[in-house]
């Protein structure tokens, strides 16, 4: 069975996350490289709503996830990828048109040397952690 690597924050776990992980699981055994709280604060400017342990436990409770590893490399995903040794790296189509290679600090040549295939999984439109946070904030404001 192939090993599928994907990474992310997975804050406020929702149906879009489930759809993405389900599609990853069709390709093989899913290993999630989960961003640490510190990296999220550095990258996004604030901490996630749910801390690392809570997000890890939620992912492990999802039937499509086989394993969760910490993204200890921060912006450089290579250490986590090397630890997992995947056959496939799966990302959402929301990354189309963006420089995913630069974001993850690797090149196509680096992937080719390790026989890793990068695949795009369709993004679930209409649901995201950002949208959930916006809805919560607008409800909070409208109830004042």
Image (cartoon, rainbow, N blue to C red):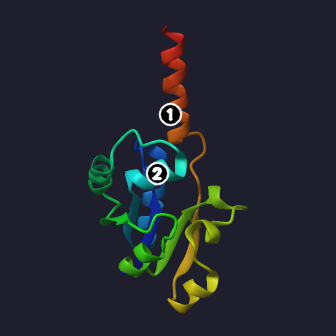
Relative to 121, does residue 3 appear above or below in the rendering? below
Mark closer to the chain start, 2 or 1: 2
> Mark 2 to mark 1: distance in Å?
18 Å
Relative to 42, does residue 88 appear above or below in the rendering? below
Residue that carries the numbered disc 2 in the rendered image: 40
SS assignment at label 2: helix
User: Which percent across, then down, holds residue 79?
Assistant: 42, 76
Q: Which residue is rendered at x = 45% and y = 55% of the image?
A: 39
Q: Which mark is residue 92?
A: none
Label 2–label 1 contact, CB within 8 A:
no
Q: Residue furthest right?
A: 97
Along the line of sight, which residue is nearer the eye, 12 or 63? Answer: 12
Q: Quadrant of residue 3?
A: bottom left
User: Which percent across, then down, holds residue 44?
Assistant: 53, 47
Q: Which residue is rendered at x = 49% and y = 47% of the image?
A: 16
Residue that carries the numbered disc 1 in the rendered image: 132
Q: Residues within 10 Å of mark 1 (few under 14, many from 20)?
A: few
| Between marks 2 and 1 in the image, the one whose residue lies nearer the viewer | 2
Q: Is residue 126 left or right of residue 6?
A: right
Q: Residues within 10 Å of mark 2 (few under 14, many from 20)?
A: some
Q: Residue furthest top?
A: 144
Along the line of sight, which residue is nearer the eye, 44 or 33? Answer: 44
Relative to 132, does residue 34 appear above or below in the rendering? below
Which quarter shows the N terminus?
A: bottom left
User: Which percent across, then down, holds residue 117?
Assistant: 55, 80
SS assignment at label 1: helix
Q: Quadrant of residue 131?
A: top right
Along the line of sight, which residue is nearer the eye, 42 or 25? Answer: 42
């Amino acid at each position: 069975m192939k090993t599928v690597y994907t990474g992310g924050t997975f804050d406020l776990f929702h149906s879009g996350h489930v759809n993405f992980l389900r599609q990853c699981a069709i390709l093989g055994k899913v290993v999630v490289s989960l961003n640490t709280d510190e990296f999220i604060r550095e990258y996004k400017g604030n901490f996630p709503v749910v801390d690392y342990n809570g997000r890890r436990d939620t992912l492990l409770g999802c039937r499509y996830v086989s394993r969760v590893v910490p993204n200890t490399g921060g912006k450089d995903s290579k250490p986590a990828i090397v630890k997992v040794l995947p056959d496939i790296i799966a990302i959402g189509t929301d990354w189309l048109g963006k420089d995913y290679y630069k974001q993850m600090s690797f090149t196509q040549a680096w992937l080719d040397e390790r026989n890793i295939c990068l695949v795009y999984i369709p993004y679930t439109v209409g649901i995201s952690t950002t949208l959930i946070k916006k809805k919560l904030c607008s409800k909070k404001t409208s109830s004042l």
